[in-house]
Image (cartoon, rainbow, N blue to C red):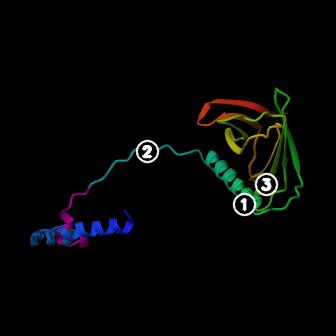
Amino acid sequence: MSANDEFDRVEQLLRSAPAPAPVPPGLVDVAREAALGGAGAERRPVVSVARRRVPRLRMGRLTAGVAVMAAAAAAALLIGVGGPDTFSPERTIALAGPTGASATVDFGSSENGTRPMLVKIHDLRPAGPGWYYEMWFRVSGDDVSAVTFNTSSSGDATVRSAISADMHWGTCYVTLEKVGDTEQRRVVLRTT
């Protein structure tokens, strides 16, 4: 059945339906007064609904999360449109894991509210089906996700991203995550 056949069928059903019953004149006047705020409108009962208070998010967590997401989007746009291939780090941190895996995170100079970041992972086995790695920063007592990735069969990965230029973090670490199950999170790399 084509779309035109379906439209024709609906049109035939609408044409075969009887005309609606006329509205009694008294109800027309009541509806008009209520809609236009006439003399009968004051008699309407006022109904109020008590709403349950919803706890507010901590502003620090929201601000840090929004900043990281905005920076990641800006970095993705820059990378997607073929941004510059050169990267001049201003600061570098090192991460290490118990199995000999390591990583470096280079931070570039801040520009337009973001700070470019180049993450290089070495000797970290691929996460496997249903698993992935995630890099986190500890910001004002909250964990803020910065990058999700997986490694190649050689255990290496290079990821370009960005963080907010105003983000002040305490520690950086990488976790192995199971898709849809945060209970199985395991830290595999930490700042040294």
Q: How crowded is mark 2: few (under 14 residues within 10 Å), some or many (20 or more)?
A: few
Q: Which mark is residue 53?
A: 2
As for residue 37 lying within the magenta part, the answer is: yes
Residue 74 at what x, y percent from top left?
Answer: 72, 59
191 shown above or below 85: above
What amino acid is labelled 1 in the image? Answer: Leu
Residue 165, magenta (yes or no): no
Residue 10 placement: quadrant: bottom left
Q: Earlier in the sequence, mark 2 or mark 3?
A: 2
The amino acid marked with disc number 3 is Arg
Quarter of the image containing the N terminus?
Answer: bottom left
Label 2 vs label 3, nearer the camera: 3
Quarter-of-image position of residue 139? top right
Residue assigned mark 3 = 115
SS type, badge 1: helix
Position in image of residue 100 (x %, y %) = 86, 29
Residue 28 horizontal side relative to residue 97, left or right: left
In the rendered structure, find residue 77 and report the number of the disc placed on it: 1
In the picture shown, does residue 88 fall above or below 40?
above
Three-letter residue code for mark 2? Arg
